């Protein structure tokens, strides 16, 4: 089983770093992009199993990135989880992406990681192995 590749597209360096750290700690292969255009380029060059996408970014916003992804036959089937501070957009996006694929900031870490595992099939065997080898306390 290969380690799932997750792409984080987020312009806020602190949120991007947090998501990257959380996902790496879980055992995922993680790539990051600081804007929508860079995210599309990275998704095209190395197709991810999942994209975590912010909505409000300076160049291409998240909605435009979603449209571009869905219009590209090679990327149209990549699952997207939106993580956004734009609370008013959450209900409409949940209708499009699904109830469990839109998280408003601040998001619950446990809930987000659970959804990422559900979508990707979980982290690779290394992440699981590390958790099993921890001694009981």
Image: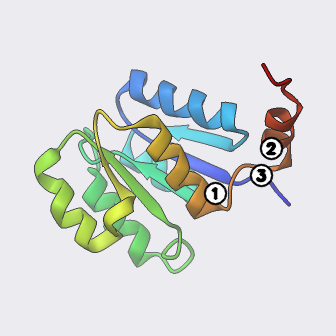
| Percent position of residue 75, x then y | 53, 71
Residue at the image position 61 percent from the left and 54 percent from the top:
117
| Percent position of residue 49, x then y | 62, 61
Colour mode of the rendering: rainbow
| SS type, badge 2 | helix
Label 2 Cα crowd, 10 Å radius (few <14 / some 14-19 / many 20+): few
Tell me how far mark 3 sits from mark 1, CA to CA.
17 Å
Residue furthest left as drawn: 88
Residue 94 left/right relative to 39: left
Q: What mark, if any, has residue 45 been given in the picture?
A: 1
As displayed, is residue 8 above or below residue 119?
Answer: above
Q: What mark, if any, has residue 3 been given in the picture?
A: 3
Work out which quarter of the rendered image holds the N terminus and state it.
bottom right
Callouts 2 and 1 close, C-beta under 8 Å: no
| SS type, badge 3 | loop
| Percent position of residue 133, x then y | 89, 31
Q: What mark, if any, has residue 73 been given in the picture?
A: none
**Residue 49 in sight from this viewpoint:** no
Viewer-nearest residue: 95 or 56? 95
């Amino acid at each position: 089983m290969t380690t799932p590749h997750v792409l984080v597209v987020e312009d806020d360096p602190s949120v991007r770093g947090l998501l990257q750290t959380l996902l790496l700690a879980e055992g995922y292969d993680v790539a990051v992009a600081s804007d929508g255009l860079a995210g599309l380029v990275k998704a095209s060059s190395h197709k991810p199993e999942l994209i975590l996408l912010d909505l409000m970014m300076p160049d291409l916003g998240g909605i435009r990135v979603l449209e571009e992804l869905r219009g590209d036959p090679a990327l149209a089937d990549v699952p997207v989880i939106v993580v956004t501070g734009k609370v008013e957009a959450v209900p409409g996006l949940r209708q499009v992406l699904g109830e469990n694929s839109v998280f408003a900031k601040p998001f619950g870490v446990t809930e987000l990681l659970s959804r990422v595992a559900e979508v990707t099939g979980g982290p690779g065997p290394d992440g699981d192995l590390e958790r099993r080898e921890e001694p009981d306390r």
